[in-house]
Amino acid sequence: MFPDIIYYEPKSLEYDLGKFLKDKYQDRTWVEIENHNNIEELRSNSNTEFGKMKQHLIIGTRKTHKYVANHKVSDFLVPYTSSGCSATCLYCYLVCNYNKCSYLRIFVNREQMMGKLLKTANSAVNDLTFEIGSNSDLVLENTITGNLEWTITEFAKSKKGFLTFPTKFDMVEPFLNLDHRGRILVRMSVNPEKIIQRVEFGTSSLKNRIKALNQMCEAGYRVGLLIAPVILLDDWKKQYEELLEQLSDELTPKAKKELFIEIIFMTYSYVHRAINKEAFPNAMELYDQTLMTGEAAESTAIEVR
């Protein structure tokens, strides 16, 4: 049962969200730590402990608030309310530092982060778009904290700007009746169902992701489709052709008219491979030395009309 153990910074319990989580999970084991970014008993674990560590929850305060220029689907990458995830996608870039940050960390000082977002958005000359989900899945996190519901409602008060985040989850019911004022761009990440089942452990099915995207679109949210990462398996062309056919059949006319598409290709390092082979010895092999050159992943956005 998630979470099995909660590691927490004492100061985090001074915040409203920290108090909420303490009450919500009062029946769990709580372990006091000095710094969420350096938990020695976890950092020293072997790779075989990866799956078990994914059941832990870490609670602290975010100290880093520097925005990073992006210029892809957003203007800035924003450090936000969580990092890591309780799901297990074998290609996740956080795997490379799993002893440090691949497990789910919640940062309770959300008012501080929202304050900077609103100030930056409203002081800009033009509308800016802020990526708030580059280090975690905020739809999944919302089931624990309610943070995304709070975020959408608070940012709707802004006079300028947009927030965007990707997700692999379908738990969107809490967002459908919120007053978002069109300031939120939801990007649903998809892959062929066979890849979801074999590589994206613990995430929602393709069919449910498509349904959730349709629901968010009908609720007036701006929507995008993220085909990512494209994994070049032996029959990859056939699998992705079937994916596109399913999207064509199941997306609503409104969604197909309004969404834009990103395509991102997979990068997979020697570190990923080494960790996954020990943590999930029976999982499929993603590495192919004839295809993987070590170059950075490329991303493209396509406007659909």
Image: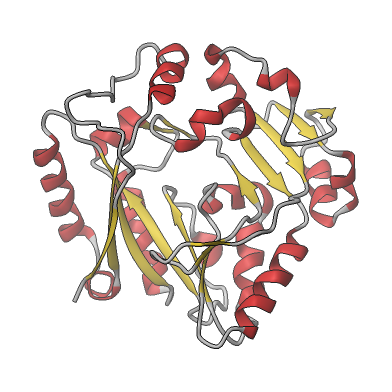
Q: Give the quarter of the image for residue 23.
A: top right
Vertically, is 166 above or below 256? Answer: above
- 208 horizontally vs 279: left or right: left
**Residue closest to the eye, 17 or 284:** 284
Q: Quadrant of the C terminus?
A: bottom left
| Percent of width and height locating residue 299 | 30, 54
- 66 horizontally vs 69: left or right: right
Q: Residue at x 34, y 18 (%)?
A: 283
Q: Residue at x 29, y 50 (%)?
A: 298
**Coloring scheme used:** secondary structure
**Residue closest to the eye, 216 or 296:** 296
**Residue closest to the eye, 303 or 147:** 303
Q: Residue at x 39, y 60 (%)?
A: 187
- 66 horizontally vs 192: left or right: right
Q: Quadrant of the N terminus?
A: top right
- 104 horizontally vs 34: left or right: left
Vertically, is 23 above or below 291? Answer: below
Vertically, is 240 above or below 282? Answer: below
| Percent of width and height locating residue 295 | 30, 39
| Percent of width and height locating residue 88 | 46, 31
Q: Residue at x 57, y 40 (%)?
A: 84
Q: Give the quarter of the image for residue 132.
A: bottom right
